[in-house]
Amino acid sequence: MSAIVEQIYTACLAQGSYFIESNGEAAVIDPLRESEPYIRRAKERGVKIKYIFETHFHADFVSGHIDLAKKTGAKIVYGPNAHTDFEKIEAADGQIFIVGGLSIEVIHTPGHTPESTCYLLRDEEGKQHSMFTGDTLFIGDVGRPDLAQKATNLTQEDLAGWLYDSLRNKIMPLDDHLIIYPAHGAGSACGKNMSSETSSTLGEQKATNYALRADMSRSEFIEEVTDGLLAPPQYFSKNAALNKKGYNSIDEVMKKGLTALSVDDFEVLSADLDTLILDVRSKEDFGKGFIPGSIFIGLDGSFAPWVGALIEKLDQKLLLVAPKGREAETVRRLARVGYDNALGYIDGGVEAWKAAGKELHNIHTISLEVFHEDTGNDHHVTIVDVRKPGEYEATHLKNSINYPLDFINSSTLKLDKKTKIHLHCRSGYRSTVASSILKSRGYDHLVNVQAAFEDLKTSSIGLEGNCPSLTDA
């Protein structure tokens, strides 16, 4: 096949977009918010981007389809039932689009959402080459069927039934050698048990993916796919709305967010009660001292998903404290999940704040040895485990309370501000995030345990649970 299919995988979002080119023409599937990666590839390879294909209204990130179309003249393509507030092609099931010597067929596969669509790529000889499955079919999993419920008045069981039909009738009859390119991999909240692999073949998925078992009935599929679904992060519905209605230009968002602020200007802006200071440094640097009122969500963790889960307003005014040289990365990664209202960053960072004689706050951070002493000598200590429910149920410290970080905003109502609270997770990242949120809300008796859970398991207070299975922070 005289063509290039390139997967552009963004690990922090566990998201795959695709650049396809043939004979001077190109197509992009499910682009990131920023246009530069696609425009640069087109320029370097001397091709024109003809189409931008969207597999569905993404909920976990803001797609770059609108900006990319404006900058390149490419046409935006969705499948059936995709009603938008901007100009696009609403393709029919089975419609064919030509890109160079290749053909791309629209395969409507409702289930994850009503408009979910896969795109089947055929080579110059008409042979099935690959399919871009969006959130319909992942490697090792399928898309969750509960995200479009409120917008459609459908139950998750209704959508799961549609997904079963789409998989059996539209995808599974295709050639086993067909390469499967999904929109997400392990770490995404759009499915339950995705593989860390980012591509496979249809034959391999038929053999290994639980949802494609040949003997699986419709009712069994619905039960398995809907079992154990956690509530989606609060930003999902808001991102889906932006993808459907439109959003601000990424260039304008970057320009505003990259305003370098003096210490005095930063302090004046931070006095606004509607403004949030977001510190994205490492958990170790944050632990050494931070600007009062700051919330920590580190760039080197699952940054964008945690921002989306914890900062409730997409239009939240944000002041940034970022490592030197990573300011643009911070603004860009915020914009990927729809947080477009960064007002700028403190020029010189925390060091400039200190040099100006300004106060820093700290959260008491302890080692494993001190944790042993505290918990061994004080039987009234409160231990808060901020890992996910499944992690906690598998193994947890005896007498600990599980308040998952995802829902810490509501959990604060259940914690006593007068009590000494020890927080821990798997590695210290999530407990640092949780500690910063509690600190900003007037919790002063906090102890952040920055120790690996594998080490905490040796604590004398003991363990409860089923098995020592752990997951990433």
Image (cartoon, rainbow, N blue to C red):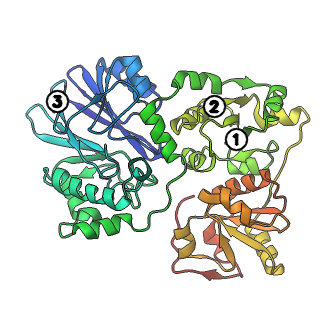
Which percent across, then down, holds residue 392? Answer: 57, 72
Q: Which mark is residue 341?
A: 2
| Pointer 3 or 1: first along the chain | 3
Q: Residue at x 21, y 63 (%)?
A: 207
- Identify residue for label 3: 102
Quadrant (top left/top right/bottom left/bottom right) for the C terminus: bottom right
- Look at the picture and state if 214 lies above or below 442: below
Residue at mark 1 to residue at mark 2: CA–CA distance: 12 Å
- Is residue 140 visible in this depiction of the protein? no
Q: Is residue 129 left or right of residue 400?
A: left
Which percent across, then down, holds residue 165? Answer: 21, 56
Q: Nearer the viewer, residue 35 or 356?
A: 35
Q: Nearer the viewer, residue 70 or 301?
A: 70
Q: Is residue 13 left or right of residue 44?
A: right
Q: Nearer the viewer, residue 316 or 267?
A: 316
Q: Nearer the viewer, residue 65 or 40?
A: 65
Which percent across, then down, holds residue 193? Answer: 39, 61
Q: Which mark is residue 278?
A: 1
Mark 1 lies on a secondary structure that is strand
Number of the front mark, 1 or 2: 2
Amino acid type, mark 3: Leu
Residue at mark 3 to residue at mark 1: CA–CA distance: 46 Å
